[in-house]
Amino acid sequence: MNALLWPGDDRAGELFGDTAVLTAMVSVETAWLANLAVHGIAPRAAAQPLAGLTDADDVPGIARAAEAAGNPVVPLVALLRERAHRLDAETPRWLHRGLTSQDVLDSALMICARDTSAAITAELETQVRTLAELARAHRSTPMIARTLTQHAVPTTFGAKVAGWLHGLLDAADDLAATVFPAQFGGAAGTRAAVVELAVLAGADNPVATAAAVADATAADLGLRAAAPWHTARTPVTRVGDAWTRCTDAWGRVANDVLVLGRPEIGELAEATGDGRGGSSTMPNKANPVLSILIRRAALSAPGTAAQLHLAAAASVDERPDGAWHVEWQPLQLLARHALGAGRQASALCTGLQVHPERMRATFDAALPGALAERAGMRELFGAAPDDDPARYVGAACAVVDAALERARPFLDGER
Amino acid sequence: MNALLWPGDDRAGELFGDTAVLTAMVSVETAWLANLAVHGIAPRAAAQPLAGLTDADDVPGIARAAEAAGNPVVPLVALLRERAHRLDAETPRWLHRGLTSQDVLDSALMICARDTSAAITAELETQVRTLAELARAHRSTPMIARTLTQHAVPTTFGAKVAGWLHGLLDAADDLAATVFPAQFGGAAGTRAAVVELAVLAGADNPVATAAAVADATAADLGLRAAAPWHTARTPVTRVGDAWTRCTDAWGRVANDVLVLGRPEIGELAEATGDGRGGSSTMPNKANPVLSILIRRAALSAPGTAAQLHLAAAASVDERPDGAWHVEWQPLQLLARHALGAGRQASALCTGLQVHPERMRATFDAALPGALAERAGMRELFGAAPDDDPARYVGAACAVVDAALERARPFLDGER
Amino acid sequence: MNALLWPGDDRAGELFGDTAVLTAMVSVETAWLANLAVHGIAPRAAAQPLAGLTDADDVPGIARAAEAAGNPVVPLVALLRERAHRLDAETPRWLHRGLTSQDVLDSALMICARDTSAAITAELETQVRTLAELARAHRSTPMIARTLTQHAVPTTFGAKVAGWLHGLLDAADDLAATVFPAQFGGAAGTRAAVVELAVLAGADNPVATAAAVADATAADLGLRAAAPWHTARTPVTRVGDAWTRCTDAWGRVANDVLVLGRPEIGELAEATGDGRGGSSTMPNKANPVLSILIRRAALSAPGTAAQLHLAAAASVDERPDGAWHVEWQPLQLLARHALGAGRQASALCTGLQVHPERMRATFDAALPGALAERAGMRELFGAAPDDDPARYVGAACAVVDAALERARPFLDGER
Amino acid sequence: MNALLWPGDDRAGELFGDTAVLTAMVSVETAWLANLAVHGIAPRAAAQPLAGLTDADDVPGIARAAEAAGNPVVPLVALLRERAHRLDAETPRWLHRGLTSQDVLDSALMICARDTSAAITAELETQVRTLAELARAHRSTPMIARTLTQHAVPTTFGAKVAGWLHGLLDAADDLAATVFPAQFGGAAGTRAAVVELAVLAGADNPVATAAAVADATAADLGLRAAAPWHTARTPVTRVGDAWTRCTDAWGRVANDVLVLGRPEIGELAEATGDGRGGSSTMPNKANPVLSILIRRAALSAPGTAAQLHLAAAASVDERPDGAWHVEWQPLQLLARHALGAGRQASALCTGLQVHPERMRATFDAALPGALAERAGMRELFGAAPDDDPARYVGAACAVVDAALERARPFLDGER
């Protein structure tokens, strides 16, 4: 997977790349076949692991062949059937039996989504730990608060970081609440084929046997057992929303770094080195490229996630005529964009350069205007004993402490 | 509130209308002022209820005056100060003290969002009860499943309704999980002004007093006490996502009614009567207007909700330069669109006409093609004893039962 | 029309407000009826002007009644028929004859869109004149160019303004190219009803008579005569795209003002006065509210315009089941947002405060880094005779001149 | 380029694929270098063609290296400099001189966009010819018009196809009006570096020489010479809007095929054969996969195009901090989606199966309701001599003729 026009894509590695999707589809077919055998429907010998039958080189051919059927599962199954003879004579005949294309693709997408979410969560954990340390260190570092671009009142850099932390912790909460259900409903969500196979195999309770196959396959794949959700697309929209919550949170951090890193402000800077931030023509430049690319992802994600909701809203029948198909690529893009941005955000947080002396200088220059609110109150209600401007930060320290308290499970390694 | 170009807007009544927002803003000011007095900061006499000072007639003037400050709170506070003399001489002086515009508007929007969500939840409850009854009644009603617009295999109408139910129950779960935090952070999220007022009032622990004022005001307003979230916009995106989950679910029901209500199919129909569905020129028409308007809302909501995420992603500083302002109207529109669609969906579900005989006729006409999957398996794996085509519905009844089980808390009135 | 949550909405005045839409719908009915008479289909007496039959007070009732038929035309026609007796006994019978709801609403929306576009064009003209003057005045005013937030190389403020001008001129070109077709297709785009009426009236060539009625009505309304476009929605998407091109251009100006108006930079500022930019709690603040509200509109417009394209893409049949209905409110919102932003942009441009001394100071402070590109070339290719840093602005003056040349038709009043 | 999760992506071939972008960037560097020599700035020997220095195998490495600088041009230039020694000793030193990364990437994207637009236009031409033939053949084929999913009044299939044609012709007009400007502005849009090089080379009028280099390079690349547009992104949004106009038009055709191809309606069908439309489990299925995949693209494009407008609206400074970067991948995706959908639409139109007998049967069954409008008028205004229901199609034939007239330049090969 490479993406010339989305710099940083490689940070997502193989996660939710085309090869990963192929691998996941094959693992769904393997696990289902195994459970057909376990539950007495298919012969034991048929249930061979299929993982070795395909590799990354098959992706282009399957991709090309996918148009004819409208999805990549049909050519994949054809390929597997063709090659499975080498495993066992019964395997081609039993492979994919009881499944529909959507079962395989939806389950595979959920596997990829789960793996991506786990990787994103790991980044959030790194960031929370890093920023908690930063918030603690700058709990009382005075800086000017800016509202609507203008100097407002005093705050502390710790309080700003506490705000970043809340965004990240909210995103982590949403990711933790996301579930990844398997999809095993058959052609129309009734599991008719696998029930029929159970009948043919002489099962006492074919419906229960079908459910057992589905639930056991879900368990083997590390997915949640679930009722068929072919046209109730909540699992897709929920994970898309959760990833967008992440990019929202990172975008806000990046925006602050970009503003506060302008040379006239200079209160924050990205770490330099490794040739990062260079210009093709201006040797003087040190561009905040991590923040720029994170901001890019944050501006992009809402529109991409909206495509998932649109797909859900346009669903119809027992499998829709385009509304299913429009989900796949946006989900993949959103996953890779979010993970890439998450890893960039970790690098950003870890390397962040803080310049308290610039914060202080700007703060001092903003006086006495920045205390006009306080002066107004004192005029009305009387003077207070203490006039240190940096003291007009109210509950800033409490704000930091509350964020750190909320972050504690991350710091203690409880997560 | 009227919306000539969004038919059905009036179904949302006054909820999250401009007057409701005004009322909510005034209630925030009142509750804050009361708690300033309760916690010894403001004199008791200052803490008058402000509700009577404004009414719907003030909306246009405040709306017009809102541009100068960029938000409606500044002119509202000016108006309240001007009129509050009639309550108590101290009231104008103390009113809004310790607050920033964003505190008042964000808290007011959360009040309106909470009330709208409650009303939407009530609709979901009605729908779940109605559809559970329908699923039960048609647990075994055979119909043809349609995938990619074409006849696929048999299913039951009950199984289709079970799919609708899962979408609604998912949405209800997300709504139930939504929290509505108050916003009390002052000019820059540090609560500096109210802490200062507590200092001036001689509080032992001014920061704790400020927190007590904030938390008590939240409680009085029925909102969750929370750390300032001026630039961590999760509360807004979460509720937007949850409402969109609702319109997604209703859209999918409406799409099915629209397809199955085409005259050539005729398996479902909207209730007629009350002049609904008429044409301006064709007396023969009975248009499925509820479904059409619901589908409209479902197509629209994802793009509107994406604006909320974009706002969150573009946040910066201690109050952003446009990213906050761009949230308000989309949030209001999404709320009213969702609630209106929810009430239309309740009417749609309650009045839904089901034609099992048309379902059966289409089903019969789809044979034997609709059993081709079964025939293929039998060819491979041997014949089953029972050949009733309507029996090739697999676990359809179990699918219904599982959905009903999940819906039980709604049916038992536990929710 | 008021919009509490979209400050500045009143700048759009009545244009494309609900009352304007009502008025436009009535004017369509009037003009059609007149042309039925002119072309010998309806009796002369029937063709009364209907304008006096309704007023703004009818909007709420029509809006409420619109749900039953799915659009506001059906209740409007009912109302007009009920009241038209007072004009002439034949009027109710002939009114709306040969039209379908979509004819009336689409034509009315085009009237409102045309009027809004004209008003937006007037703003663009003002802005182009203002900015051309500014570009000329600051043709050689040195400032530092900023790329990726960092100081890059020298430029002039005139060159920056030239860039703004190109955006505005592009938008003006697109607006000038927009056409506003009338919609007169009857129930299914075949004009069957009016052709039938022409038959009944004994027309020699009923199809030609129907076309004559349609084309004359279009001309009377100031719209382009056109083939029915009930399901080919280009007129709607084109105007939406053109308006978004405007908000794009204004957004870019506002973003520059917001960045360059940060106190640490201080190179630009909005005009102050009229209480604009005040804070509810901080008397020191002078917020750039025009830029903030313009930026808000620019962030919002793309998602709104996308709804129009989605509607076009989801069109089906001879009138779609929701895809038509979802167009109306976004079109109205986009119109009012764009016009409001346009008028704010005119105020912004007219009042813009430029601080060349701050530009110069920043420029000087950016040396010698800002000349590193030049230094690199000189190292490679030899020194040039002139070392004035402000001379490293290349073709900046030519860039200004080219933009002024392009703006000339606006300056000469040729437009 | 393969895209496992966007079936049909391969229909776009190499157009706007990553390798095509790389090739275009190299061609920009080559043409610029050549013109530096032609205009006396660089030595003739330095101006070597660079095309052979890179190939598709370089894409992954450049993509990976692109993050450090935030764009792929910086590592590409490094690679070219490293390898250009084999061409001429002067080439590495002169290569890219006077350019900025954005010049190279923007110009390359315009080259790819132009090539994609040309390919899309060719598809539109094919479709217009095919559909014009179809409209002519079915000029009088009666069918029932459907509005809001219900039977309305008679129409002809030719009139429906005429509506499709207008959508395609509108899109073709917009594509024909699109221009593709080169970008040659240097680091900050002032062309300072190339002007400086012209100074060092002793040019009489260095600014004019710089303009001559830029304009000649544009001409060599087949792009429009233009003022720098680094932050005035109209060229990007215009082409995105034009492509979306195409997918809108194709989506509307696909939607009609999907509805009219439902088995209960059966008036249209996709061509079968080549294994297209098969199911992984149901041998009876013949799915309209072309229409499904076209509809998918149509649902997706508006949100993708909106990202381009958002990028334009968020532009700032002389090169923005993320708003530029967010454009590239959506532009590429939109291009490939549109071209793929265009080629699918050509296949759909060419192979479309029309069933006039089913149209007629449905039409007959819709009587007399479908004539209720006519009956109502006759009741009011008297009977007409002819009662053939198929005659109540008004100007349907004229509608066809007008569309054919508009299509004539395509039919005559004038385009």
Image (cartoon, coloured by chain):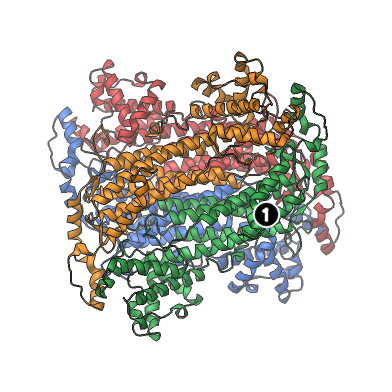
Chain colours: A orange, B green, C blue, D red
Residue C218 visible somewhere in the drawing:
no
Please name whichever residue, D383 or B59, is drawn nearer the observer in this view of the structure. B59
Question: In x, y percent, where is residue D156?
Answer: 75, 43
- Above/below status of D239 relative to D20: below
Question: In x, y percent, where is residue B161?
Answer: 70, 48
The residue sitting at 41% across, 22% down in the picture is D56
Question: In x, y percent, where is residue A114?
Answer: 49, 37
Which residue is outermost to the front? A204
Q: Quadrant of residue B384?
A: top right
**Is A294 on the left or on the right of C44, as rendered?**
left
- Is disc 1 surrounded by few (<14), some (14 to 19) or many (20+) residues within 10 Å? many
Residue with the mark numbered 1: B291
Indicate the secondary structure of the residue bearing disc 1.
helix
**Is B101 on the left or on the right of C175, as rendered?**
left
Q: Quadrant of residue D94?
A: top left
Tell how many labels: 1
Quarter of the C terminus of chain B within the rendering: bottom right
- Above/below status of A255 relative to D296: below
Pinpoint the chain carrying mark 1.
B
Residue C136 visible somewhere in the drawing:
yes
Quarter of the N terminus of chain B within the rendering: bottom right
Q: Amino acid at mark 1?
A: Ser
